[in-house]
Image (spheres, rainbow, N blue to C red):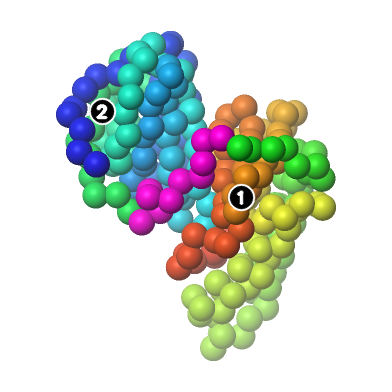
Amino acid sequence: MSVPVRSLHFADAGEAEDLAAFLARLIHYDRAAAVRLQAGGGALAVFGRPPSFEVLAIRTARLGDRVELDVTVSAGELLESLGGAGGAEFTVPAAVTGPPWAGLLPPRGGWRELPGLPEVTAMRGAVAAAVAEFRTRDEQLPAERRTRAERDRIGREIWSRTVGGTGLPLRAVHAAQSLGFLRPGVPVALLSTGAWLRLRTPFGSIAVRTGGLGGLSVTPTRPG
């Protein structure tokens, strides 16, 4: 969607710092990452899709402007526009052609909280155990079977496991930890609406469709 280039103001510089950290992590996984921006009601929602996780990552920030905006931009250009997270004003980069996932975002309303989510320490431990299991099974593969397809098969088996008594796949927890959302001692909640599940923390959310986003590799990365 084409929009005129404009400047927006965060409510304070801390919001810029938090968003810059999120963008830097996305770019770490994909240097060509795009993000979809939606602004309204004094808030900015930034959606991204880190490769390998089959999830959407969502970071929100408070704005000093009450503007309406919906545009997909380069994550790298947006990070540069934040000026190294040193100020509260930024320029919205030019729009880019959005990747397929940018047209399939979770709904804004209708979410209800679900029970059964383990505490943060247990979830972080599950991610660490899954990473260790993947490495062990990968090392045990004979040389002729150590292919990307076989590693993806093992990764899909491990990261598709659900968390506690919920339907949330472990890959969503892995993504939350890798992006800095899942920190010790923070409150977390599992929400649901339609085909979507959402792991919500004070630092950001991870949303996943129960049917998946399709066509993605799930070879695990190092936990964040």
Residue 92 shows which numbered tag? 2
Which of 158/141 is in front? 158
Judge from the rendering whether residue 162 lies leftward or rightward of residue 176; answer left or right.
right
Q: Mark 1 points at which residue?
A: 194
Residue 84 shows which numbered tag? none
Q: Main secondary structure of the magenta part?
A: loop
Image quarter of the N terminus: top left
Q: What residue do we see at 72% from left, 29% from top?
A: 187
Query: Which range of residues does the magenta coloring cover?
Result: 100-109
Label 2: state its secondary structure.
loop
Judge from the rendering whether residue 125 lies leftward or rightward of residue 58; answer left or right.
right
Q: Is residue 107 magenta?
A: yes
Q: Percent position (x, y) of residue 29?
A: 43, 50
**Few, some or many residues within 10 Å of mark 1 (<14, 14–19, 20+):** few
Q: Percent position (x, y) of residue 97?
A: 24, 49
Q: Is residue 157 visible?
A: yes
Q: Percent position (x, y) of residue 12?
A: 43, 11
Q: What residue do we see at 65% from left, 61% from top?
A: 159
Depth check, mark 1 against mark 2: the one in front is 1
